[in-house]
Structures are given as structure tokens and as C-alpha cells.
Amino acid sequence: DDEDDEADYADFVAVPRTTDDAKRTSVMCKTHVAADFQPPSFAKTPDQVAFLSGVLRSIVFLRHLTRRELGVLVGAMRRVAFEAQTVVVREGDRRADLFYVVEAGSCDITVAGVGKVMEIPCAQQPSSSTKEAAAAQEAVLRRYFGELALLYDAPRAATVTATTPVTAWVLDRVTFKSILQDTDNKKIVLYASFIQSVPAFRELTIAQTHTLCNSLACKDYDPGATVITEGAIGDDFFIVEDGRADCFKRVDGTDTLVCEYARGDFFGELALQTDAPRAATVSATAASFAAAVVVVVGPPELLLLLAVLCIGRSLDVACRLLS
């Protein structure tokens, strides 16, 4: 439950204070993210991306992220190195705006008046109630620290010292907040470049692109998952962000492959123009399929924009489905 999960992302063990002046106060920070902010991106190998993605997925308050959102955070992480005995984070420091993931090496975490309270890497504290899931989680080493700096405006709770040469990856608070805060430009940050890369949308103005971005909701689908079902009622329009999907039409009791969809393709546009049931079934086929879904309960100008863009494609698709 949520109370158990608290232990998963507590920075360090709680330490009692003896005076009111010494109490550590924390405030959930509302970081300003500029309207034109673009997250940094640093090159990484596929193995590094997989490693960082796995670590971020293990943190409770990041588990709800879509693959797209997680990818932005991973892309923004930069590599740093520390020599042995270097103080990486100092207790009480208010310049606490970086989160660290240790790729290689080890660190000691100490609290004034208490001493050493933790080592990094160390075994995760299980947050699951099932023995199997808890055992699997314990097998994963905790390799991160400083995650509360992403959430709270508060001084560091402990000192972190490299005990060996350390290679780590750091993420800044502004990039984190650009994805986690419910800001007007969040979806623009996530989807503007993707929308502009789709041939059907390349002629959109900046204002039209932003209107479309703000109406998107990303969904990830497992291999074999059904995205839409023939005969069902739907009002969503799908743009393939990544992966592949197959489109089937039922003919004489048999599902017949009509076409395949890849990045930049879109389907479900007939829902914008008619209340008729879905004309075909679309299923995810790739291991990493993501669809940017336009929820068609938007402003009238969005519906008009999409209808104009899709009318030509709809005629082509309709002909193939009916043939």
C-alpha cells in the first residue's frame, strides 16, 4: 500500500532533532518551467538507457510515467564522475536540485550525530505484499539517492561520500518538473517534435501544433493488445508514436489483414466524422508499441482541424476496408 511504499523512496532514515531550530522543514516546490523550455538530451548507449529506465521505474512516484515521459527524463540525465572520498552531497546544503543514479562504484550515506546509515548500492526495501514480488524487488539493488530534491525545496538530509571512484547519472529538477507538473507546456515539450515529424501534420502552424499537442494522451500497449475493436463504438483518434500495429477486417468469419501501421501513421479518424462503429480491429504487434491518442472531446477548432487533415486519408482507408 502507499504507506509501505513511503519506505521505498525515503531519502534516508529519520533522525530525531533536539531543538525546534534544528528541525528540517520541507515544502513541495512549484518549480517555474519556461514556456519555451526544451529538455536537454545526452547521448547514451541502449544498455545505458535500459539501465536508467529500470532504476527510474523502481521509484514509487515515477511508476505511473508513460514510456514517452520516462524517455525524456532518461535522455536528460548526464554522466558525472567522482574520485574516491569526494563528498557528492553535503547534509544541510540548500542547493539540492539534483537526483543521482550510481552506475559504478559505491557511496556511504551519513547523518551528523548518527553516523553511517546506508550504503549505495544496497538492497531495495520491498513494498509489495506478496512474497514473490517482494523477493523479486529485494534482488534489485537501490542505486539512487537525492530523489526528494526533485520534489521538495529542502536542505539535504544527509551527506553522501564516494568510497570508491564513482560514475553516476544526474537529473535536474527543472527537467523533472517539466514532465511531472501539470503545466500548459508539458504536452508541447513531450509531443511537439513528434507531431511535426508526422507527414500529415507538417503543414500545421505552431499554434495548431500546440492545440493538437494539448489534446493528446499517450497510451502504451503490450504486444498483442487490442487497441480498437471492429464493431465497437469509439471517439478516439490514434497516432502511432512508436512500434507497429496490424489492422484486421473480419471477412466471412475470418480476420483478414488489411494494412500495417508504423510510427507516424494514424487510424480511428472515422470517429471524427461519423458515429458509426469501428470499421476494423487494430492490435499492437511490436514489443514496444505506443499510441498518442487524441481524445475527441476537445475544442471545436481541434475537431475541424483533424477532420480537414484526415478526410483524404479516410477515403483511402474506407475504400480498402470495403473492398
Image: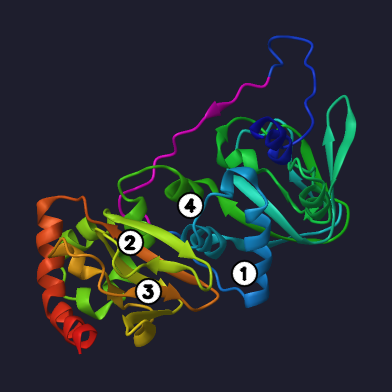
In front: label 2 or label 4: 2
Label 2 is placed on what type of residue? Val
Label 3 is placed on what type of residue? Val
Label 1 is placed on what type of residue? Val
Label 4 is placed on what type of residue? Thr
**Residue 62, percent from left and from top:** 57, 48
User: In this figure, which residue is indicated by the disc labeled 3?
Assistant: 282
Q: Residues within 10 Å of mark 2 (few under 14, many from 20)?
A: many
Say which quarter of the image contains residue 97.
Answer: top right
**Residue 202, percent from left and from top:** 21, 76
Q: Earlier in the sequence, mark 2 or mark 1?
A: 1
Mark 2 to mark 4: distance in Å?
Answer: 24 Å
User: In this figure, which residue is indicated by the disc labeled 2?
Assistant: 293
In front: label 2 or label 1: 2
User: In this figure, which residue is indicated by the disc labeled 4?
Assistant: 175
User: In this figure, which residue is indicated by the disc labeled 1?
Assistant: 49
